[in-house]
Image (spheres, rainbow, N blue to C red):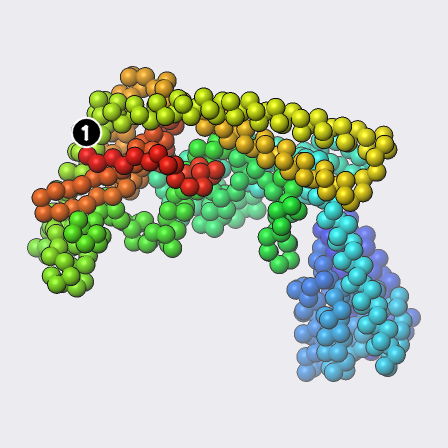
Amino acid sequence: MRAAIYVRVSTGQQAMQDLSIPDQIAQCEAYCNKREWEVVATFTDAGVSASTDNRHDFQAMIAEACSPSKPINVIIVHSQSRFARNTLDLLHYTKKLEKAGVQFVSITQDIGNGDQADVLRTILGAMDEYQSKETSKHVKRSMCENARQGFWNGSQPPLGYRTYIAEKRGKKDKKKLEINPTEAEIVKRVFRLYVHGEGEQGQLGLKAIANLLNNEGFTTRKGSLFMMQYIHKILTNEIYISKYVFNKRDSKTGKVRPEDQWVKLTTPRIINDVEFYAARDRLQHNHPLVTAPRIVNSSILLTGFVHCSKCNAPLRIRTGKGGAYRYYRCGKHADAGISACSGCSMRMEKLDDIVLNTVLDRTLAPERLDELLTPLIERNTHSQRLQGERIKSLKSDKRQLRMQLDALWQQISTEELRLDSSLKSYIDKLQTKYENTSRAIIRLEYQNSTPLDSFTNIQKHSFADALRTRLTAKGQPKFRKAYLRSLLSHIDVGENIIKISGSSTDLAKLVSNFNSTGKLVPTFEQEWCTREDSNLCPLDS
């Protein structure tokens, strides 16, 4: 008899300890030696669950056992649970082996052969599957509680973080996250390149950032090159703004769990909100389903937001004189002819200059900034007063909730109350309300942290000069286009009139950020702004 031994452990920690697998192999070899069976192969899956058949060595063993050359007569396992913890997989693969003439033997569960053995094997398989699901349920519950207490659950932290032992409980190390200074600088640079650009380069795309980091010799933690997907994952990971959610998705199906099962963990902050949401807004705007890639990647300054005033069709670039001249021309006229629209046409350089000069000379003129910002400042002052009162009320609610929670936990610890399911549900609701109140306070305080009324005349001139420098940067059309989009939303071109429109709210966002940071960031919507403000005021200049 030619035997193959299959051994497995479920977790990486078990595999690293290197105890269970050698013991399984030794016992299986002793079993074979006693029967004078020849061990021709040993297959090992370390740190892999048997609840799925997606195991490398397992599939290799099945393929070899069922091959026409029949190199294996019997498969030996320490216990049936090593082979499978899914009843359907167990029955499927044992029947497959049976058809190939290969025996299946568990050295600790000798149930023989025949119909009775099949029934017993099915019963044992169902028990193994039930035990696996129960164990998984208890492990998940323990991990959720660990996260609620502010500890990190074992997995590799994202780039920019590392774990440290915060405390010991018996033999267990309780870990928390801290910032890895070297990696954090890479994360900060990725955001800086995507939102601001670097030097005279202007904003970079995902591929350009990956290429730049790779050319400079940077690698991921695993030593591999940076890829576009990796850069996208960094730019969308809310852990960098101190928001991490544990147990959000089912690890097997990938489906999002109900929100009441989420555990929210506060992490050390690496990126500020302004930069994070600016990056998110640019990612959303550049998504192919939102904006065509030809517009995102175009070096044409006004591509995507210049339109024909007669039919509102976008203007496209057309060339003349063998490519010597370029024109913005009505797209509908180009597609359907004069019967659809008589069309409009203008030299690209001429329209670019008109739009840029209008913005530079009129919108960014100090007196025009005063005219645009004065009503916003008045509304902002009134809004800040109301928000200040709201913050006081919320802080009072937060203190009351904290006192209630502390009192309940004190009574539970002294066994005055028993933590049953109904009490736990009530505590979870209080905790959720406490967290929502805390987030509301942070949100309102952030909105109140950059008042427009403190924007001095000197800062107005500095702001106008900084934006003028960005808009006139030579050789950087994508860079200039990003900042032009932060001011303008629509350009209508007619035969005699060019109408340039933009939102004063977007201008206020640029002003507020410049007031608080001294940096210009293209406009973006805050996470909590789920709809546009009712006080939007379009700018026609």
Identify which residue is drawn at 86% across, 73% down.
120
**Image height check: is 322 above or below 153?**
below
Q: Position of residue 418 (x, y in %)?
A: 84, 38
- Quadrant of the image containing the C terminus: top left
- Label count reads 1
- Is 117 left, or right, of 204 in this rendering? right
**Who's the residue at 80% across and 67% down the image?**
126
Q: Nearer the viewer, residue 100 or 192?
A: 192
Which residue is at a point 78% across and 45% down the rendered structure image? Answer: 421
State the SS at label 1: helix
Q: Quadrant of residue 394?
A: top right
- In the image, taking residue 183 as reference, residue 324 lies left or right, namely left
Expressed as whole percent of the image width and height from the top left, the position of residue 530 reads 45, 41
Choose between 480 and 389: the one closer to the eye: 389
Dot 1, crowdedness within 10 Å: few (<14), some or many (≥20)? Answer: some
Residue 444 vertical placement versus 484 (above, below): above
Q: Nearer the viewer, residue 443 or 223?
A: 443
Q: Residue at x 68, y 42 (%)?
A: 153
Q: Amino acid at mark 1?
A: Arg
Q: Which residue is mark 1?
A: 362
Q: Locate residue 145, reporting x and y percent.
A: 73, 41
